[in-house]
Amino acid sequence: MESIWSQEEQTKLDNALVKYTKDAYSNSKDRWRDIGLMTGRSPRECLLRFQQLRNDIKLKYAETKKDVHAERDVNSKIQVEDKEMSNKSDKISETITSSSSSSSSYIYNVS
């Protein structure tokens, strides 16, 4: 069950995580005990909150990364379509120019 954390408690947890780094402890239980003492929460509550926030950040990162890749794919497709349309437009222009030239020639030959 998820407990509600006040902004003050969250700030205490953030500060405790900075103060009590995992590199400073050989035993993680001691670290979470100290974090709990600083926050006023149990070591288990602090650990669960930390894990929840870490997972939320990972999910958000994955979604953002997925969105960025999707946007790149769309932009790539648009660029390909733009190039294809430009090529078609050039061919149509050439055809019209060629038709106009041959029509002019034909008109001149008839007169």
Image: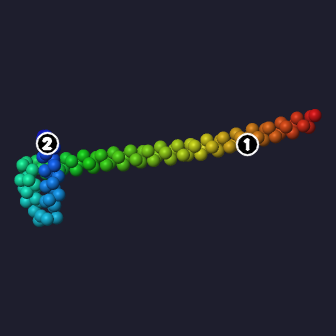
Q: Residues within 10 Å of mark 1 (few under 14, many from 20)?
A: few
Q: Position of residue 29 (x, y in %)?
A: 8, 58
Count of numbered labels shown in the rendering: 2
Left or right: where does residue 105 sit relative to residue 93? Answer: right
- Is residue 60 toward the left or the right of residue 32 in the image? right
Q: Residue at x 60, y 44 (%)?
A: 84
The residue positioned 14% from the left and 65% from the top of the image is 24
Say few, some or many: other residues with alpha carbon within 10 Å of mark 2 (under 14 / 14 to 19 / 20 or more): few
Specify which label sits upstream in the sequence, 2 or 1.
Answer: 2
SS state under label 2: loop
Q: Quadrant of residue 83?
A: top right
Q: Is residue 29 visible?
A: no
Mark 2 to mark 1 CA distance (whole Å): 70 Å
User: For numbered disc 1, what is the local secondary structure?
Assistant: helix
Mark 2: amino acid: Ser
Q: What residue is drawn where x is 63% and y is 43%?
A: 86
Of marks 2 and 1, the one in the foreground: 2
In the picture of the structure, the residue carrying the numbered disc 2 is 6
The amino acid on which the numbered mark 1 sits, given as a three-letter code, is Glu
Residue 94 image label? 1
| Residue 30 seen in the current view | yes
Q: x%, y% of residue 38?
A: 8, 53
Residue 92 x/y as whole percent: 70, 39
Residue at 37% x, 46% y is: 66
| Residue 68 place in picture, x, y as percent | 40, 47
**Which residue occupies the extreme right position in the image?**
111
Where does the C terminus fall, quadrant-wise? top right
Q: Quadrant of the N terminus?
A: top left
Left or right? Give the position of 6 relative to 83: left
